Amino acid sequence: MSQVVPFLDLKAQYHSIKTEIDDAVLGVLASSVYVLGTEVAKFEEEFAEFHGAQHGVAVNTGTSALHVALIAAGVGPGDEVITVSMTFIATAASVSYTGATPVFVDVDPITFTMDPSKIEAKITSRTKVILPVHLYGQAADMKQIMAIAERHGLVVIEDAAQAHGAEYQGKRVGGIGHMATFSFYPGKNLGAYGEGGIVTTNNPGYARHMKLLRDWGQEKKYHHDMIAYNYRMDAIQGAILRVKLRYLKAWTDLRRTHALKYEASLSKHGIRRANELTGRYHVYHIYSVFHPARQQLQAALQAEGIHTGMHYPIPVHLQKPYQFLGYSEGDFPVTEQAAKEQLSLPMFAELTQEQVSRVAAVVNSWVERTNVA
Ligand SMILES: Cc1ncc(COP(=O)(O)O)c(C=O)c1O
């Protein structure tokens, strides 16, 4: 059996920064402040600054980040939120938590992010928020989306769970929309050693509201201003994320180097890729290829010890819990075709150039054989 190429290798990254991480964790253990505290507060500041935003509100997951951002935007029962079906279910589920309805639009066939030309037809008197997803690590078309939101008086929340450090027209995501949410699930470009999330914003009113929402509605202990949540970030995660944030740029550069190498090799044989558009800075959380015989391609790679993923095989509008909304196959052709054809190749900073070359060579030779057959 050939050498295994994992889809993701979290151990390699830990070993590369072990001393700093261990010191940070031991520091928290010794401090006896285990929830929120100065490590989390400093992380909020540093992460927000990195993304060009004035405020950061750290929470326990990316899903909670979406939930508190939606509530801060005033979303509640009976409201509508325009989003995409081509995403992880958390995007839609967080809308459902508020009692509002997710209203889906299709994505564009180049970036697989929200197609702005589809938004206005879906705006009603109940629409409160537009919630684009920076899928795979590439920003959605924020200029168009912000212009539409402004025309209709809507709030824009960026779901940047997969897009730490991504840029749109020279500006990092996180400070473009009214709020942006990130996930620190371990496999993300900036991953905690457990769960974590954050909302960034330039609006102090939203930031204050979300700080109340994540911590039982209290600014002063046992004085509760509202029925809220326990969505606090652990201090250990804050301390770990502070260390890892310092490496994010270097790790992103490595991901981009791998993506360039994939691109240079795969373009010769023409398999479809989710390409970086001019004016965007893709951080390649996921490196996607597309082929109608995706299952066979995945099997061919697996036979060579190369692990892959699918993001995502069933679009949200066709998932069981959203059947009640009445969507059907054919409603979002770009999303549905991508769900059938997308395959995620190994992508993480510590991949070697040899591993990238081998993955690309196996894909290319499979494409060649398939084209001939
Ligand atoms: C696009 C998107 N939104 C939201 C989430 C939810 O983040 P978390 O898993 O941290 O709750 C994820 C994570 O997988 C995601 O990929």
Image: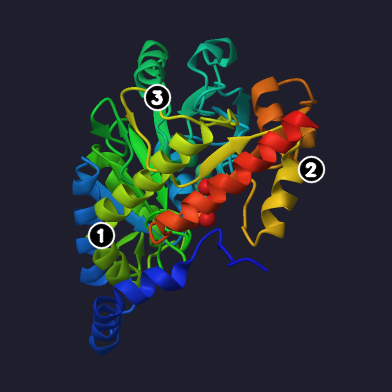
Is residue 294 among the parts visible in the rendering?
A: yes
Residue identifier under label 2: 320
Q: Identify residue type, mark 1.
A: Tyr
Q: Earlier in the sequence, mark 2 or mark 3?
A: 3
Query: For the view shown, which residue lies furthest in the bottom direction?
Result: 30
Residue identifier under label 1: 247
Please identify the quadrant where the N terminus is shown.
bottom right
Is 93 displayed left or right of 276 in the figure?
A: right
Q: Helix or strand or loop: what does disc 1 sit on?
A: loop
**Label at residue 277:** 3
| Disc 2 within 8 angstroms of ligand 1 (CB) | no
Which residue is found at the position 57% from the left and 24% from the top?
A: 107
Image quarter of residue 217: bottom left
Q: Is residue 58 above or below residue 181?
A: below
Q: Residues within 10 Å of mark 3 (few under 14, many from 20)?
A: few
Q: CA distance from mark 1 to mark 2?
A: 39 Å
